[in-house]
Image (tube, grey):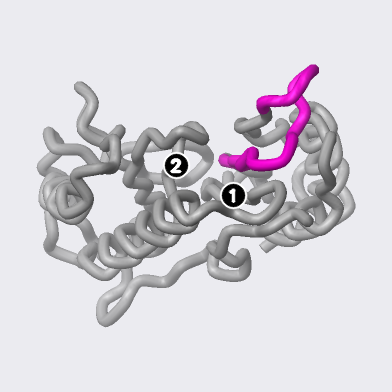
Amino acid sequence: EIGARAWGRCFDELHMGISIADVQRRVVALYHEEGADLGASPPMVMGATGPGGTFVKGDILYIDGGCTYSGYAMDFARRAVFGSPSDRQIDEHDGMWEVLHKVIEFMAPGVAVREVFEFSQSLIAKHPYWHNYSDHPSKRIGHGQGYGNEPPSISGTDDTILQERMVLTPEPKLESKDGLLNPEEHIVIRTGGNEILSASSSWKLHVVN
């Protein structure tokens, strides 16, 4: 929740010409204002194509990672577009979040993480014009999460069985013209429906006018 508030406040301040470094510095300051652990590292920020790493019309800002609280690390991803999004950008963003939502519904106690990976690939395969980045050699679409990235890997080679109260961050990926697109949520496995810890942060594509 601390990280979500910090990102939301930063997104509301975005403007044309802001740089990747400016976004990272502002987010770190907001982490501290919102009550995160001191010494929080800046999140990964990508997507700027303007001079000096600045965001210009048509760019999509991708932010991933997050702060820590009592040592526990957040990890999810959000995106913002500068100017009106194109039909392609909307299709890719909304389409991949739909994939992620279905993956989260599929994840349940008793399911192997290998099966989760295979299910995600079957969904992405329905969009042959997308460049699937999930099926690179590591065949990995996420991981466990605690004090940082932890086992298990949500991969095609891991037979770990999901159990109640496991904490993971599923993130199927594609490579877009705008860069990496991997929707990601921070979830807890629950019987009868998973808990999305990152739900306080909207997954919708944020538009910067």
Q: Nearer the viewer, residue 164 or 23?
A: 23
Image mark for residue 15: none
Is 152 situated above or below 92? above
Image mark for residue 181: 2
The quarter in which the C terminus is drawn is bottom right
Q: Is residue 186 visible?
A: no
Q: Position of residue 47 (x, y in %)?
A: 61, 32
Q: 10 Å neighbourhood of mark 1: few (<14), some, or many (≥20)?
A: many
Range of residues picked out in magenta: 49-64
Asked whether the residues under the numbered discs 1 and 2 touch, taking CB atoms below 8 Å apart as contact, a structural biologist would say yes
Residue occupying image coordinates x 14% and y 37%: 156
Which of the 4 image quadrants contains residue 129? top left
Q: Position of residue 23 (x, y in %)?
A: 79, 37
Amino acid carrying mark 2 in the image? Leu
Is 39 situated above or below 161? above
Q: Position of residue 108 (x, y in %)?
A: 21, 67
Amino acid carrying mark 1 in the image? Arg
* Horizontal side, residue 48 vs residue 38: left or right: left
| In magenta stretch: residue 120 | no
Q: Position of residue 147 (x, y in %)?
A: 53, 40
Which residue carries the number 1 mark? 79
**Mark 1 falls on what kind of element?**
strand
